[in-house]
């Protein structure tokens, strides 16, 4: 085993799938010579050539339309949308076409399409390059939504997403790509992590914390601190795939802890954790000792100034406070 | 359509493009089959209108009456295993591509035996196996999908091409621009066939465009393109045939504007306040079926009696389809969440 960054793990998943299956190809803006805005596809043009690493004009709607049409006719495209904010430009193709084709056609077509996109803030890129729009896509039947939080998961989940016969929105986090704090051992061989399975990243018996993407890392940070300083043991659950959602892993955890804190980066109003909270209330009320509480983004666009941005997006200290409040240990 | 003699034989000129009269070389049986397809479309739509009047269509329908020559002429100019994408006004394309009339009609009535098991309805009929990548409820929604299918053809080197049908309205959607530009820079094997039927719902092309010909937009993409009489089956067939070879050879996309007219309202709830009876009458006088029938009779390919028999056969086929649809079962409510995911 050797250690890889999140970005390297993504690239390796794509390279290994492309070597194995000639129907897999990449399409997106600046992914060839430039290697993608975040450098994920660096070196792939040299190995696979411009026929399979397809650089496009700046036309997000057409990128997803073309990828969808090629998926219906036998290819397995991986479309890169540079910033997740730009999926809104392609929304007809995502929401009305890719997501609906199978159902509208009575199950007689499949759309094996992966849309890889960089989500999340913390980079000072402000309102149009920092959003967490996962709730928007997770709401649409026909789409699968994946948000990996670490290098090991991102490789296995991307391989599964490419192998899946449905459109998958694969949301990567910009602050994870080259994050030296979460480099991990990643097996060299290709492996799958099934979509629809969450993962307990840290075991604990006092409280359950369910989080997505970069917020898993921040939750783990808060959990370590509380363990060392106050002896509070948090169970941190990485949701990993928002749709299909593994609600059982959360229910199993609250049977043990009786309390659930949900953490996400998106604005709290209408966020995905509202769904988690509702399902836990409906299915796990008897095991709860307190209401489900959410720690999430503030109800505003992502601001530019560092001071404001840190106020908008939850960090470890806000998660820590949320945990203490829920345990009545303020 | 002008004709010119030359020592090699007969050429025709359509909108400045000189091309071979490939229609002329077709077997009579194919020429007759195309007339039969037009009758099937016309009577399928008449029957559908009856279903609408009787309240048997749950949603809406967009009828193709008056535009039959475009679908039939274009689809008979490509191979059976080539791809098409269609529009919300898609019954004609679907029938021309060889769809089963019974299964189509069952879908319109929301029946389990329909193409989409009752989940799609009129605007979503597809038959991916036969190359029909589907009607589309979003104006312009299929232009990207068609372009993606053309990318598959190029990547798999399978020799297939795509005919992408869309209306004048779709030519003002962003996806039109993004897709045709990509097809042009990558030389994709696709024919963009714009059915200019004069109105996008109620908005006339005069209001929606500041150019004479939609095909003039070819200049923006550096591709070939022309405007044809979409109510003349022979012209549609020849124009599309002319470009299929170029497309298959990897010499890029084409933009064909087919001038036609929908006789009926936009959908079942259209009071048609935006156009005059006189205008409709002028277009009805250019009925694509009457014009094509006359050509076949004048050329002695068909007698008047054979023509009447052909139409009768089409009518009885449609009656059969309507009966099949009426007698088919509705889906079970328990099937509602089936087919969301593969």
Image (cartoon, coloured by chain):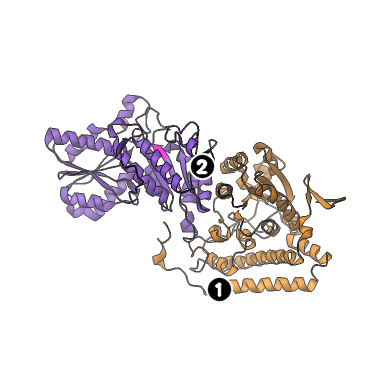
Q: Please name the residue shown 32% across and 39% down the image.
A: A151
Between B336 and A247, the residue placed more toward the observer is A247
Task: Specify whether residue B37 is in view.
Answer: yes
Q: In terms of secondary structure, where does tag 2 sit?
A: loop
- Residue range of the region highlighted in magenta in the rendering: A117-124
Which chain is rendered orange in the image?
Answer: B
* Furthest residue in direction left, as rendered: A231
Chain letter behind tag 2: A
Q: Is residue A23 left or right of residue B288?
A: left
Checking the image for residue B324, the label placed there is 1
Displayed quadrant of residue B37: bottom right
**Magenta: predominant secondary structure element?**
loop
| Residue B339 lies in the magenta stretch | no
Residues beneath discs 2 and 1 located on the same chain = no
Label ID, residue A118: none
Q: Which residue is mark 2?
A: A52
Q: Could you tell whether B21 is left or right of B150 in the image?
A: right
């Amino acid at each position: 085993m050797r250690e890889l960054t999140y970005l390297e793990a993504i690239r390796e998943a794509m390279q290994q799938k492309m070597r194995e299956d000639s129907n897999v190809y990449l399409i997106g803006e600046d992914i060839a010579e430039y290697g993608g805005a975040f450098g994920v596809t660096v070196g792939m043009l040299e190995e696979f050539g411009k026929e399979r690493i397809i650089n496009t004009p700046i036309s997000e709607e057409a990128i997803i339309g073309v990828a969808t049409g090629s998926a219906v006719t036998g290819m397995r495209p991986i479309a890169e949308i540079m910033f997740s904010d730009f999926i809104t430009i392609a929304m007809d193709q995502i929401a009305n076409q890719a997501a609906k084709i199978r159902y509208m056609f009575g199950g007689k077509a499949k759309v094996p399409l992966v849309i890889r996109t960089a989500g999340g803030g913390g980079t000072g890129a402000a309102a149009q390059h920092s959003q967490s729009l996962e709730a928007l896509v997770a709401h649409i039947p026909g789409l699968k939504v994946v948000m990996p939080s670490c290098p090991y998961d991102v490789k296995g989940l991307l391989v599964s997403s490419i192998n899946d016969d449905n459109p998958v929105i694969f949301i990567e986090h910009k602050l994870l790509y080259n994050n030296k704090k979460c480099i991990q051992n990643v097996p060299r061989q290709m492996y799958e992590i099934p979509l629809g399975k969450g993962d307990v990243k840290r075991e604990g018996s006092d409280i359950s914390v369910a989080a997505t993407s970069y917020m898993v890392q921040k939750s783990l940070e808060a959990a370590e601190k509380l363990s060392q300083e106050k002896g509070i043991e948090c169970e941190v659950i990485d949701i990993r795939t928002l749709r299909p959602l593994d609600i059982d892993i959360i229910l199993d955890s609250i049977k043990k802890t009786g309390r659930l804190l949900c953490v996400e980066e998106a604005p709290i109003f209408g966020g995905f954790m509202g769904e988690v909270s509702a399902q836990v209330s409906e299915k796990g009320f008897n095991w709860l000792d307190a209401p489900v509480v959410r720690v999430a983004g503030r109800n505003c666009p992502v601001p530019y100034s560092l001071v404001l941005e840190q106020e908008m997006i939850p960090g470890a200290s806000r998660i820590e406070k949320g945990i203490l409040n829920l345990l009545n240990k303020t | 359509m002008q004709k010119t003699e030359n020592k090699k034989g007969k050429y025709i000129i359509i909108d400045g493009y000189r091309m071979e009269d490939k229609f002329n070389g077709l077997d009579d049986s194919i020429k007759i089959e195309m007339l039969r397809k037009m009758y099937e479309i016309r009577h399928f739509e008449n029957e559908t209108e009856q279903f609408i009047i009787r309240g048997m269509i749950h949603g809406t329908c967009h009828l193709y009456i008056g535009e039959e020559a475009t679908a039939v002429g274009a689809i008979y100019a490509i191979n059976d295993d080539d791809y098409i994408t269609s529009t919300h006004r898609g019954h004609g394309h679907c029938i021309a591509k060889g769809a089963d009339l019974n299964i189509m009609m069952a879908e319109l009535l929301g029946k389990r035996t329909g193409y989409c098991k009752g989940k799609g309805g009129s605007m979503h009929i597809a038959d991916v196996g036969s190359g029909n990548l589907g009607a589309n409820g979003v104006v312009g929604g299929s232009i990207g999908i068609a372009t993606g299918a053309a990318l598959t053809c190029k990547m798999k080197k399978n020799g297939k091409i795509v005919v992408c049908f869309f209306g004048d309205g779709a030519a003002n959607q962003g996806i039109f621009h993004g897709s045709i530009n990509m097809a042009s820079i990558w030389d994709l094997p696709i024919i963009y066939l714009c059915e200019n039927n004069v109105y996008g719902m109620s908005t006339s092309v005069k209001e929606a465009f500041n150019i004479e010909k939609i095909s003039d937009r070819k200049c923006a993409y550096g591709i070939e393109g022309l405007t044809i009489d979409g109510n003349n089956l022979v012209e549609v067939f020849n124009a599309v045939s002319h470009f299929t070879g170029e497309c298959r050879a990897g010499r890029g996309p084409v933009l064909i504007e087919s001038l036609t007219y929908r006789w009926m309202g936009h959908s079942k709830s259209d009071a048609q306040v935006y156009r005059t009876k006189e205008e409709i009458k002028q277009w009805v006088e250019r009925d694509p079926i009457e014009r094509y029938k006359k050509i076949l009779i004048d050329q002695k390919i068909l007698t008047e009696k054979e023509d009447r028999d052909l139409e009768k056969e089409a009518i009885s086929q449609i009656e059969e389809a309507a009966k099949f649809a009426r007698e088919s079962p509705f889906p079970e409510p328990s099937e509602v969440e089936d087919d969301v995911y593969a």
